[in-house]
Image (cartoon, rainbow, N blue to C red):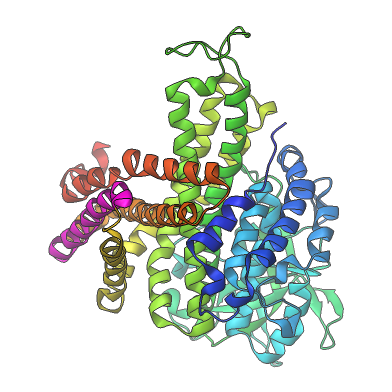
Amino acid sequence: MPSYKAPTKDMSFVLHDLLKISASEIPGYADLDSEFTTAILDEAAKLAEGAMAPLNAIGDQQGCRLENGVVRTPDGYKEAFEQVKAGGWNGLDLPEEYGGQNLPYVLQSAVGELFSGANMAFNMYQGLTHGAISAIIAHGSDAQKALFLPKMISLDWTGTMNLTEPHCGTDLGLIRTKADPQDDGSYQITGQKIFISAGDHDMAENVIHLVLAKAPGGGDGTKGISLFIVPKIMVKDDGSLGAPNAVSVGKIEEKMGIHGNSTCVMNYDGATGYLVGDLHKGMRAMFTMMNEARLGVGLQGYAQAEIAYQNALAYAIDRLQGRDVTGTKNPDGPADPLIVHPDVRRMLMDQKSFVEGARAFTMWGASLIDRAHRMNDVQADGLISLLTPVIKGFLTDKGFDMCIQAQQVYGGHGYIEEWGMSQYARDARIAMIYEGANGIQALDLVGRKLAQDGGKHVMAFFALVKDFIKENEGDARLDEFLNPLKAASKDLQAAGMYFMENGMKNPNDALAGSNDFMHLFGHVCLGLVWAQMAKAALAALDGGATDRAFLDAKLTTGRYYMTRHLPATALHLVRIRSGSGAMMALSPDQF
């Protein structure tokens, strides 16, 4: 049976040694000293390890079922959900006036990793609710906030986001769901949505759907879309529940993974809905949810890689296979453990160096969100807008790859369900698809984010890397980190220059290299945080830190990433410079 151990020690290193959060000027960060964050993470770890992780395989095996119009969740889910509610975990970073705790988002992200790593499908119920809450906070009226947010933050009610329809996913301008205005100011919502995560379940007394629909007068395309609150059960003015709304579950989708989460087809048959924000401005409101969700999905990618790595490591240490070519390491046994073999070490080091780098990258991104929201810092907002498609796309692509690597460590046992490794691969696979497929993330990065605000945000990123290198090039111990980072950053700049020189003449040349650019950018980001973590580890060692083994391992793992993975930027640059000629040469009938 697979197990999960919350990586709180590494999280503390990222929060305090790398990001130095308690010394930050961001409002609320001064309270995040090591003692406080340790207490929060330890409590979250108990819940993740004790209540959520044991249900992961159960949820995968049982899935959800539709009975008399109500979705039934797997055994144990209700009880675990009650523990999440009792701990107030959903409101960790949400406003106090509605029942939240108003702690920084960076801490919510750390807790989110623990919950997602322990049981991704289960954590999606509160995760989607958190996104819906954020959209209502940003765009809802005061009355809507007062009516819906307290119950949603407490998880008495949960939330969803309804975008996709059977005939359209990415191209939301094609949606057909209609919103007909009523005399009382409400709207009648009619249409069908698919792939709705946590669309219905038996753990909360109501589900608050946020639905994209087209109201009259909006015109064609996305400009005509509006966002509506559509409760499963109508909510009276005093907050009590009324009659069922005209919302129903058509079916539960049969999926490759995340079986414990109810992914539903939702039917709206003249359901009552309430406009959120301005009419015909629904995409702006929905993107509030999607941007937060995309960082959360990037987090899911490396969280699945983390639990897969933990179990692959345990197996490699325990499983006896073959002899070490340099000499027997287990003379009293019939063979040496798998971990002595270089190719097994390669797979494990790939996983370890990715996960630790991804964690640092994502937590840095979360701190930028805090800086943007708590300080109205437009530079931080621009930088995290640039990095969001990289966090989502690169980390989920690589997170899935690492789950496959972990499965490979097991050999044939990795292909057998009882060992549990296939679940991590199956669950991680969706993260590359939902909240904007990774190809769309790459197109967004190259087609929109690079040129945003005259390109000043990508220039700010280049300056950040350059300044870090310049500030630390006097420390010879960091040369093995700074020199590869400098080379990788030059590759990234060269790729950006290629797009500037060729993209206008032939847009396909830019778009053909978009996926490579996203991965090139991702490697540079992980190279940057690894160089920063190396500096932090050396500083801790210089300061007499007692846990030298942890810090030495951090430095060694970072060296592995810089030598084995960061050089991939050169390959991505060559591919980008090859343009679109060969890619677009065949006519459709030649495929």
Q: Quadrant of the rendered structure where residue 180 is?
A: bottom right
User: Residue 439, percent across and down?
Assistant: 38, 53
170 part of magenta stretch: no
From the viewer's perspective, is 432 left or right of 110?
left
Location of residue 488 in the rendering, given as x and y in whole percent from the top left corner: 26, 52
Q: Position of residue 238 (x, y in %)?
A: 85, 87
Q: Residue at x 75, y 49 (%)?
A: 52
- Residue 586 or 440: which is nearer the viewer? 440
The mark tally for this picture is 0
Q: Is residue 217 left or right of residue 144?
A: left
In front of the other: 47 or 235: 47
Frontmost residue, 74 versus 539: 539
Q: Quadrant of residue 384?
A: bottom left
Asked if residue 379 is positioned above or below residue 396 in the image, the reply reads below
| 500 inside magenta stretch | yes
Image quarter in which the N terminus is found = top right
- Any part of residue 165 in sight: no
Residue located 54% across and 52% down the image? 545
Q: Which residues are magenta?
A: 476-505
Residue 373 image offset from top left, x and y in percent: 52, 80
Helix, strand or loop: magenta stretch: helix
Q: Residue at x 53, y 58 (%)?
A: 14
Residue depicted at 53% across the width and 38% down the height: 403
Q: Quadrant of the C terminus?
A: top left
Height in image: 569 above or below 82? above
Question: Viewer-proximal residue, 299 or 349?
Answer: 349
- Residue 167 shows in the view: yes
Question: With 257 as the anchor, is 170 left or right in this view?
Answer: left
